[in-house]
Each structure stands twice: as structure tokens, then as C-alpha cells.
């Protein structure tokens, strides 16, 4: 199967009962500002070209963000900053992502999540993270011919990525490298192919951006470094 097929198939997954219930429940109750929206209410596939050299990895969809709009990081403040930053760096054709099918295109970048369904309080359980792992592991495996850089947006993404990268064919050092903003590890490919450059970046959530822990300049700098390392 190629990435287009994977993106379609994942939207039918119902493996996590608690998350299936939550994604559908929020779609029924909605938020006042979005009463006229027909929520997506399914797993969110990765977004971006199937031959991307750079992959950005977040946490999980927001209940009234991606779970509503059907596109990853779309419809909440985290995504607003992320897409605006990609546009500033020439990696997106527009600064705004509105909903799936709005014509936004990314250049050389794919964005994905280790957990594809919106969790209550934005907190998936460890069991849910592990249940969802085969989806991102398969996605990374399908991206292997082109991917040279991965950015983990936050510690959750970092922890979820290490075993997924291992499953997809890269060697993860032991002891496992620690997450931090600016953390950088080179992972050799087990088949002798090109290595992968893994970067840590604070998550683009308002909790980090409102406190100044992550500024737009820091985010752009990190993304620029990772994009260059990936040959973009
Ligand atoms: Fe399936 Fe992942 Fe959603 Fe669980 S979180 S139901 S494994 S897509």
C-alpha cells in the first residue's frame, strides 16, 4: 500500500474505544462557535506530500481543532502558529490552514501525529499511544525513500517516535536520547541507506507560546535548521 492508501485506511480505525467515543461525542455536542460545522470526528491522517524529506510530529488532534476540520493541526492556536511559520520559511503555499480540502499545499514537509484521534484533555493513555503506533511506524516506513529529517514537537512526540522509528528501520541509540528543545540525534538506517536527523522542539501549544517558552523566532530557527538538514 502507498501513503495515499494508508491515509484513507487510517480514517476507518476504531481500535481505541475511549477515543472513538470522545471524537464522536465532541462532534455531537460541538462548541458554540462551531455549531454549523459538520465535525470530521474520525482519525486524522498525515498531511503533506508522500515524498517529503522533512516530517513534523505532534501529539494528537484537538477535539474542536483537527477533529472538527479533518486536517492535522488545523483549527486551533497551535496549528495557526505552525502553518504561519512554515509559510514564512517557504514550506507552505499559504499562512493559514482552514480545513481539509482548502487548497493548502506543503512543500517537502509532511505533518503527522503518533495518536490520530482526539483524546480527552489532550492526554492519550500509554496504551492508546502504543495501539496507534503501527500507523505512524508504517507512515515513516513508506516515507523512507525520501525522509531525511524528523522534528518531534514536544516530549510526547519524542517518546512515541523512538520506537516507531526503530520499527520503520532506523537504529535508535541506547540509552535512548533525551528530549529537549534543540536536541539532535542522527539515526543510522539499518539497511545502509541515508541516516535520519531527529530534532526536538517544544510543542507549539499556547501553554508554551503564551509563556514565552517557545517564541515564533525559536520555532522558525528550529524548523529552518531541520529543513536544511533534510536538504530543503
Ligand atoms: Fe485507531 Fe489510532 Fe484512533 Fe486508536 S488513536 S482509534 S489506533 S487511529
Image: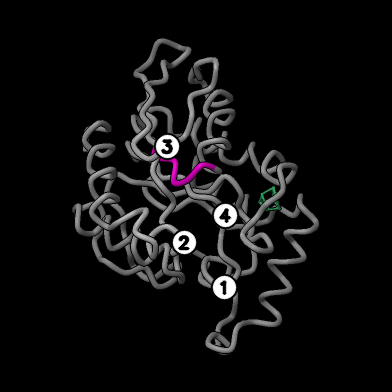
User: x%, y% of residue 171?
Assistant: 49, 16
Left or right: 43 as drawn, with respect to 107: right
**Contact flag, marks 2 and 3 (Cβ < 8 Å):** no
Point out which mark residue 64 bears.
1
Residue tagged by mark 2?
A: 207
- Which residue is more in the foreground, 105 or 96? 96
For mark 3, give the secondary structure.
Answer: loop
Q: CA distance from mark 3 to mark 1?
A: 28 Å
- Which residue is more in the foreground, 90 or 222? 222
Residue found at the very far top of the displayed protein: 192
Query: Which mark lies nearer to you, 2 or 1?
Result: 2
Q: CA distance from mark 2 to mark 4?
A: 16 Å
- Decide: is 105 above or below 168: below
Q: CA distance from mark 4 to mark 3?
A: 19 Å
Tell me the residue at 60%/53% (across/down): 116
Instruction: Give the class, few, some or many, for how many residues have Cα within 10 Å of label 1's Cα (few <14, many ≥20).
Output: many
**Contact flag, marks 2 and 4 (Cβ < 8 Å):** no
- Decide: is 133 above or below 217: above
User: x%, y% of residue 79?
Assistant: 41, 63
Residue tagged by mark 4?
A: 60
- Which residue is more in the foreground, 114 or 47? 114
Tell me the residue at 57%/54% (across/down): 60
User: x%, y% of residue 218?
Assistant: 27, 49
Decide if ligand 1 comes within 8 Å of the CB at mark 1: no
Quadrant position of the C terminus in the picture: top left
Tell me the residue at 70%/82% (across/down): 29
Instruction: Give the class, few, some or many, for how many residues have Cα within 10 Å of label 4's Cα (few <14, many ≥20).
Output: many
Left or right: 229 as drawn, with respect to 166: left
Amino acid at each position: 500500500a502507498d501513503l495515499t492508501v494508508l491515509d484513507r485506511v487510517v480514517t476507518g480505525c476504531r481500535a481505541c474505544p475511549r477515543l472513538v467515543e470522545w471524537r464522536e461525542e465532541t462532534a455531537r455536542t460541538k462548541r458554540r462557535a462551531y455549531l454549523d460545522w459538520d465535525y470530521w470526528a474520525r482519525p486524522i491522517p498525515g498531511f503533506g506530500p508522500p515524498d517529503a524529506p522533512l516530517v513534523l510530529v505532534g501529539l494528537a488532534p484537538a477535539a474542536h481543532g483537527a477533529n472538527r476540520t479533518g486536517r492535522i493541526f488545523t483549527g486551533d492556536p497551535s496549528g495557526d502558529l505552525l502553518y504561519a511559520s512554515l509559510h514564512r520559511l517557504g514550506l507552505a503555499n499559504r499562512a493559514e490552514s482552514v480545513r481539509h480540502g482548502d487548497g493548502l499545499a506543503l512543500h517537502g514537509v509532511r505533518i503527522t501525529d503518533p495518536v490520530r484521534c482526539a483524546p480527552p484533555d489532550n492526554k492519550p493513555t500509554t496504551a492508546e499511544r502504543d495501539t496507534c503506533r503501527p500507523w505512524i511506524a508504517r507512515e515513516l516506513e513508506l516515507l523512507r525513500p525520501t525522509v531525511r529529517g524528523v522534528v518531534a514537537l514536544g516530549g510526547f512526540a519524542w517518546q512515541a517516535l523512538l520506537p516507531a522509528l526503530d520499527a520503520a528501520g532506523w537504529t535508535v541509540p541506547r540509552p535512548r536520547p533525551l528530549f529537549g528543545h534543540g536536541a539532535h540525534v542522527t539515526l543510522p538506517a539499518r539497511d545502509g541507506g541515508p541516516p535520519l536527523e531527529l530534532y526536538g522542539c517544544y510543542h507549539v501549544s499556547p501553554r508554551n507560546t503564551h509563556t514565552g517558552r517557545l517564541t515564533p523566532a525559536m520555532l522558525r530557527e528550529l524548523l529552518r535548521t531541520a529543513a536544511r538538514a533534510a536538504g530543503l
